[in-house]
Amino acid sequence: MLKAAWAPYTLHFRETAVTSRARMHTKDTYIIKVWDSADSGCVGWGECALFRGLSAEDTPHYESVLTEVCRNIGFYVENGFPEISSLRFGFEMALADLKNGGKQLYFATPWAHGKRSITINGLIWMGDKHRMAMRIREKLDAGFRCVKLKIGGIDFNDEVDLLRHIRSIYSPSEIELRLDANGAFPPDKALNYLETLSRFGIHSIEQPIKAGQPEEMATITRESPIPIALDEELIGVTSSADKARLLSSVKPQYIILKPSLCGGFVEADEWIAAAQRLHIGWWATSALESDLGLAAIGQWVDKYEPTLPQGLGTGRLYTNNIQSPLHLDGEQLGYDSARKFVLPELKWQD
């Protein structure tokens, strides 16, 4: 008989993480385990990576739902899990791990066996102009050639000055710049902002306006001089028909997939299939999971043999991240299959 339990875990940022939505000092997540009572020595591990303030299921009842699913895990395996994205993400992880022997092997790809690496972008959090410039310099010195900047949280003219400074030193052929506005631009000003930003050879910009405005987003995508990537727009869209409808109506150049926010791995696969039918590009990013969830995303991404840099560079954000086989060599994210995960002491609930 299948059994399951969950435990809360709070991750602590090394520095305050700033977006246009919030300032974050900690990140709550939930570690889960699944095992067969006939073989308690084999345990499947997962992470229900709730993102407070962003996940569609961020409600006061989340832990009650986790308890319900763990107490009746056999029923939910047979009949399907609730449409709660981070919960599906975590239990897909745990069940895959259990099936593969409880070795944190979720997708048996070459990356998971240490046979190749994944190219990632360098992530630059918001800050004042000087702090952001310093962080960019650190990423470039570390060997990154694709840098993603969070924008929309400081004065727009300061952000423009920063981009101008970067381009005075590095051409688009030397450094690829991605921007993430996290929905910060007013719809009536977005195209003017994008026109200004386009002078600096921008690869793409994620979510220039807030999600939930598909008609405005379609207009922006059609008229923008910078390729548009949808991110938060995908959250809460669950049916295959709605996925296809959204992509067909907005016609973005890219979509950004966070499996813990967009329905888990199975639904992320659906998003990719829908995007490919419309010749829309994609890459994956983490949603501030611990290294446990990040490892599963890396294993999943690798099955597609991605050519674009992925957004999987969040592993070093925390002072108390879970020890893992993940390692970073410049812009290459690797997985040392000889190393093991070391989980912290946790207070289990069932």
Image (tube, rainbow, N blue to C red):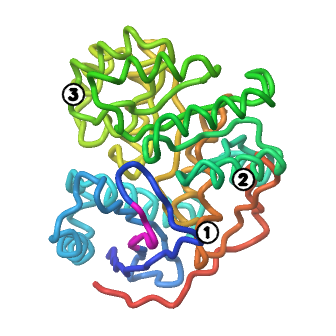
Q: Amino acid at mark 3?
A: Gln
Q: Is residue 265 above or below residue 88?
A: above
> Circle 3 — which element?
loop
Residue at left 34%, top 77%?
Answer: 4
How packed is label 3: few (under 14 Cα within 10 Å), some, or many (20 or more)? few
Can you give x and y, in whole percent of width and height, for residue 292 in the image? 55, 66
Contact between marks 1 and 3 (CB within 8 A): the answer is no
SS type, badge 2: helix
* Foreground tag (1 vs 3): 3
Q: On the image, numbered disc 1 is attached to which residue?
A: 103
Residue 134: which disc?
2
Please provide percent x and percent y for residue 304: 60, 33
Give the residue type that dot 2 points to.
Met
Tell me: residue 41, above or below residue 188.
below
Label 1, label 3: how far apart the Cα atoms are: 43 Å
Q: In the rendered structure, which disc, 1 or 3, sits on the residue that comes first in sequence?
A: 1
Q: CA distance from mark 2 to mark 1?
A: 39 Å
Residue 28 within the segment the image draws in magenta: yes
Is 207 in the magenta? Answer: no
Observer-nearest residue: 181 or 163? Answer: 163
Q: Tell me if mark 2 has few (under 14), some (14-19) or many (20+) residues whose alpha carbon lies within 10 angstroms of its own.
A: few
Which of the numbered marks, if any, corresponds to residue 61?
none
Q: Nearer the viewer, residue 302 or 166?
A: 166
Quarter of the figure with residue 60: bottom left
- Tell me if 157 is positioned left or right of 63 in this view: right
- Measured as percent of width and height from the top left, residue 323 is found at 65, 75
Quarter of the view holding residue 91:
bottom left
Mark 1 element type: loop
Span colored in magenta? 23-30
Please indicate whether residue 64 sits to the left or right of residue 49 in the image.
left
Q: Which residue is mark 3?
A: 213
